[in-house]
Amino acid sequence: MDRIRVLSLNAALGALDYSIPEGLDPVPGSVVVAPLGPRLITGIVWEAERLLSAPVPDEKLRPITEIVPVPPIGAPLRRLIEWTAEYYCASLSAVARMALASGGALKGPATTTEYRLSGGLPDRMTPQREKAIERLEGEQATIRELSEIAGVSEGVLRGLVNQGVIEPVEVDLHRPYPAPDPDHDVPELTAAQTAAADAIAASVTARRFEPFLLDGVTGSGKTETYFEPMAAALKEGRQILVLLPEIALTEAFLKRFSDRFGVAPVLWHSSLKSTERRRAWRAIATDPTEGGAQVVVGARSALFLPYAALGLIVVDEAHEISFKQDDGVRYNARDVAVMRARFEEIPIVLASATPALESLHMAASGIYTRLELDSRFGAAELPTIDTIDLTQEPPESGHWLAPRLVEELEKRLEQGEQSLLFLNRRGFAPLTLCRNCGFRFQCPNCTAWLVEHRLSQRLACHHCGHETQPPETCPECGEPDCLVACGPGVERIADEVAARLPEARIALVTSDTLSSPGKASAFIQQASSGAIDVIVGTQLVTKGFHFPELTLVGVVDADLGLEGGDLRAAERTYQQVAQVAGRAGRGEKPGLVLIQTRHPEASVIAALAAGDRDAFYEAETEARRSAGAPPFGRWAAIIVSSEDEREAKDTAFAIGGRRPQVEDIAIYGPAPAPMALLRGRYRYRLLLNAKRTANVQAVIRDWLAQFDVPRSVRINIDIDPYSF
Ligand code: ADP
Ligand code: ZN
């Protein structure tokens, strides 16, 4: 009897065995629907010898119900799913769900109905209808999605459909995306750019696995450079995946892409609408020679999709920590991307001006090919960098900008040039307290202060989203008008700029203000056209943007990132400041960067001021080597959490009490995690520091397998954690 093994998308079910009914011909990778009790489940046919399942005798096997009419998941992606689950101690099902986009991409017929405004008006206008008509301008989506966009009920929208104000549109989910033209607008590359582009293109043509570190200073034209091997892959009929760290960056990228290739690429990210998601998934799984997608630009989740003919992967701004996923399957998309390229036997490009130390180490070890672009494109020079020692040149009391920085801002305004102030803190003030009794506003669900957002008039937790209105009186002592804001956030910096430079046109750039692609492109448009004098922003402004008139960058508090539980605090500070500095002087006028700090002598600040990247990386390498930190050793965290503090603590100590004695692995804790309370769950943490040679995953798996914890306790394993 023919028996097949099916990996269910449901982690609780794991792998199950079935028989093959007459007329069906499943192969490894086939997506199938099969019965389980009275229900139907979706899964992927897997090589039986690679996957354990509960033993079922032949006579008890049930046949699968159907094969879903999509191309089978290829062997390279199946190996990637196995590798990811093994390396990150995750379930195979959870990883496989990402490939099938949680199964949602498969469901439904080839066409669907979407809705949009017809231009007509209702017989009777109501506030709800008016709101819907105003907000749905230019939108086309399902009724449910439109109701979310407009903030009105589906009932209101259906009423408008009945009156013909909203009209249905049939959408063909199999219609192909427009084809990028590799010869649309080919730039002339510099000699260094050409050498780098040719090296990558050679690997594309040879179809071999080769990781490239495209290490180019800010403004050197990394994008122009990797566009050329992308063109080469297009000419070979192969697909290209470009991973970007943040959706906010895609707008600027899309513009450059369509300038170069004539059309927009296929987008993939978590907020895609359901029909677009299904259409994109199908196109990705289809060979380009048969109308499939050619270039996919996406967030990290695009990495696990079933590309039919992947030929090249590009990870732009590869050092960005947003490639690390911190819930669900905790993986680092940069590292998994390299593994995908390896299984697919294709080249991959990690592009960055400030590569992760791990990536530089791989290049130094000869595992990655380093391609260097060491000067800016055209006449642009790298900016001059100087520090402002806040202990010597303090801002006026109650202010945050030192006199020298204010002077330079004024000078730029007079000359009609642009300035940018960077502070990695959203909101107005990170802490609000009562002047009378000392009460501090804290999140009820997290170990965190509530951050005042003055623009939206609320106190918000940046970890769980909890929000309240700031009260008139202190909730503790009842005093009126006693609440004071402590410390600056970007809103407060923008206020200070407005007070000191009343003429200046100021743009505040944070995830609160740049919350949609439309707002992002409006900002880019304004900033490029010279309609903005001073940009004040969080880490969103540190990357990607290219504004030729921007000549001054002020880093409001360079010491901020050096505090807290970030394992890579120094590296991240270096990267953020170097990236934001890289926004200055990209045009013809030279740039100046002023870094405000209380520790100008700290090695990372000194290296930034001296423009000596090698000095920083060398010092950091030595520090990591002696701490046994990556890339020389490996960290792993086990986080035990529960809504009940006692339960979390007891479980963590029970686990800690039976720690394995393994040479090459040191185990610390348990101790309360730095975020000891997060989203209403109490968290205890065990930390493992392992030598490179130790199989830390196997040790963790065997260790935790001894415990059967109640459902109310969650155990999360974080391999290569970024923050604790
Ligand atoms: P990076 O990503 O390395 O910081 P960009 O790719 O943003 O640099 O390039 C900086 C600027 O120089 C951009 O405006 C880009 O269009 C321009 N540029 C770079 N290389 C070329 C080239 N070969 N021809 C024309 N313009 C270029
Ligand atoms: Zn919270």
Image: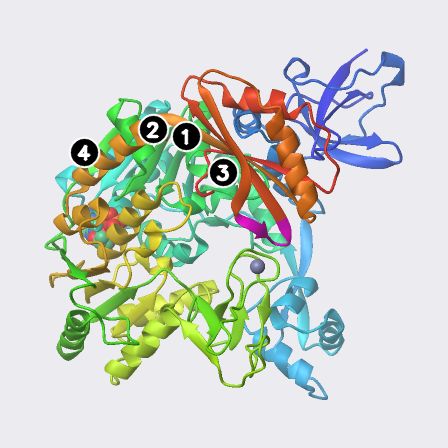
Q: Nearer the viewer, mark 1 or mark 4?
A: 1
First in sequence: mark 1 vs mark 4:
4
The secondary structure type at the circle numbered 3 is: helix
User: Which kind of residue does numbered mark 4 sit on?
Assistant: Ala
Q: Calculate the distance from the C-alpha at mark 3 to the C-alpha at mark 4.
A: 28 Å
Which of the numbered marks, if any, corresponds to residue 338? 1
Q: Secondary structure at mark 4?
A: helix
Tag on residue 195? 4
Mark 4, residues whose alpha carbon is within 10 Å: few (<14), some, or many (≥20)? some
Is 142 left, or right, of 518 in this rendering? Answer: right
Work out which quarter of the rendered image holds the N terminus and state it.
Answer: top right
Query: Magenta segment, which residues?
Result: 675-681
Q: Amino acid type of disc 1?
A: Val
Q: Residue furthest front?
A: 437
Q: Which badge, 4 or 2, is on the more N-terminal residue? A: 4
Question: What is the crowding at mark 2: few (fewer than 14 residues within 10 Å), some, or many (at least 20)?
Answer: many
Three-letter code, disc 3: Leu
Tell me, yes or no, whether the highlighted magenta stretch contains residue 680. yes
Q: Are marks 2 and 1 in contact (CB under 8 Å)?
A: yes
Quarter location, residue 337: top left
Q: Main secondary structure of the magenta part?
A: strand
Q: Could you say whether the residue bearing mark 2 is in a helix, strand or loop?
A: strand
Disc 1 to disc 4, C-alpha distance: 22 Å
Percent position of residue 379, x then y? 10, 55
Circles 1 and 3 in contact, beta carbons < 8 Å: no
Upstream in sequence: badge 1 or badge 3: 3
Identify the residue at the far bottom of this view.
124
**Cα separation between marks 4 and 2:** 16 Å
Name the amino acid type tagged 2. Pro
| Residue 368, above or below 186 | above
Q: Which mark is residue 303?
A: 3
Disc sitting over residue 211 in the figure: 2
